[in-house]
Amino acid sequence: MIEIKNVTKEFQNETAIDYKDMVFENSKSYMLLGASGCGKSTLLNLIAGIMAPTTGSIVIDGKRMEELSQRERDKFRIEKIGYIFQDFKLIEEMSVIDNINILNIEGIDTQGAPKLLEELGILDKKNAKIKHLSGGQKQRVAIVRALVKSPEIILADEPTGNLNFAIGEQVIKELVKASQGKTLIAVTHDERLSKYFDFVIDMNEITSGKRDVVSEEGTKKC
Ligand SMILES: Nc1ncnc2c1ncn2[C@@H]1O[C@H](COP(=O)(O)OP(=O)(O)OP(=O)(O)O)[C@@H](O)[C@H]1O
Ligand SMILES: [Mg+2]
């Protein structure tokens, strides 16, 4: 379980986000909606321990993240969190499989990659260079790279941002399916995709103080 407790994050003395209590249950999928600049990426970065909150606490499975050293937080992220970045962060000149096997440097076992590539329909691109792939194929590689370590938590920042609706919908379906049994938090602007998630959280409403908890299962709006 991920608990957000009275978290604020300031940048240059300006409060970017201010969340009271928010809980993400284990093995559930969450879609984060919200206007540009309302703090969606910041929230993912805080959960991943890439940045620390200015005040408040992020508690993951009972562990208070701010009490860990940066090194311990990095270890936690490497082992437990799969992060799919909006801009993929893939190396264009390298092959699909090498982009995944590069994780071996961090001690991650990538033997499960072929099976995941197969599940996402891109096993035949295993040896292709990233620069020769379409946007949807790159997105799938980014998903495989995040999932290969069997993370407990998957954070996806606009995984369909660069894709047309039909391909984006397909990628979301595959992402949700591949994330079964894990906690998935995905940022997306497209409300049409909400039906694939257990919960939808509207950050606009949270940031404006209208609500501070998530919706009921299956509902479309917060
Ligand atoms: N590193 C940073 N330095 C200064 N300000 C930042 C930084 N990161 C985010 N902000 C500010 O914090 C606020 C929230 O930004 P964030 O990137 O989390 O928004 P977002 O909801 O992800 O937006 P988008 O939908 O455009 O990606 C914005 O006002 C932004 O300018
Ligand atoms: Mg963002």
Image: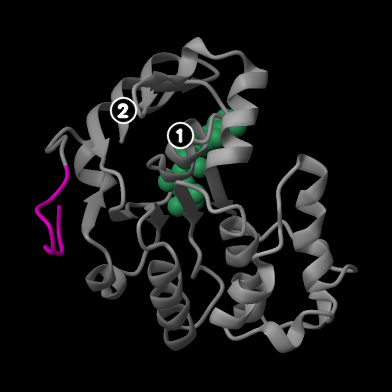
Q: Is residue 144 left or right of residue 23?
A: right
Queried on whether the Cβ of the residue with tag 2 lies below 8 angstroms from ligand 1, the answer reads no
Q: Residue at x 45, y 46 (%)?
A: 152
Q: CA distance from mark 1 to mark 2?
A: 9 Å
Q: Position of residue 8 (x, y in %)?
A: 37, 21
Q: Which residue is mark 1?
A: 47
Query: Does residue 124 lie above or below 99 as drawn?
Result: below
Q: Is residue 140 left or right of residue 158?
A: right
**Label 1 with label 2: CB-CB less than 8 Å:** yes
Question: Magenta includes 25?
Answer: no
Q: Which residue is mark 2?
A: 4
Q: Residue furthest right?
A: 93
Of residues 66 and 213, the one nearer the viewer is 66
Queried on whether the Cβ of the residue with tag 1 lies below 8 angstroms from ligand 1, the answer reads no
Residue type for callout 2: Ile
Query: Does residue 207 lie above or below 178 as drawn?
Result: above
Q: Is residue 87 left or right of residue 30?
A: right
- Residue 11 seen by the camera: yes
Q: Secondary structure at mark 1?
A: helix
Of residues 30 and 98, the one nearer the viewer is 98
Query: Does residue 145 lie above or below 108 as drawn?
Result: below
Crowd around label 1: few <14 · some 14–19 · many ≥20 (10 Å): many
Q: Residue at x 42, y 62 (%)?
A: 179
Residues in magenta, as a range? 214-222
Does label 1 or label 2 sit earlier along the sequence? 2
Residue type for callout 1: Ile
Q: Position of residue 210 (x, y in %)?
A: 12, 37
Q: Quadrant of residue 204?
A: top left
Crowd around label 2: few <14 · some 14–19 · many ≥20 (10 Å): many
- Residue 50 seen by the camera: no
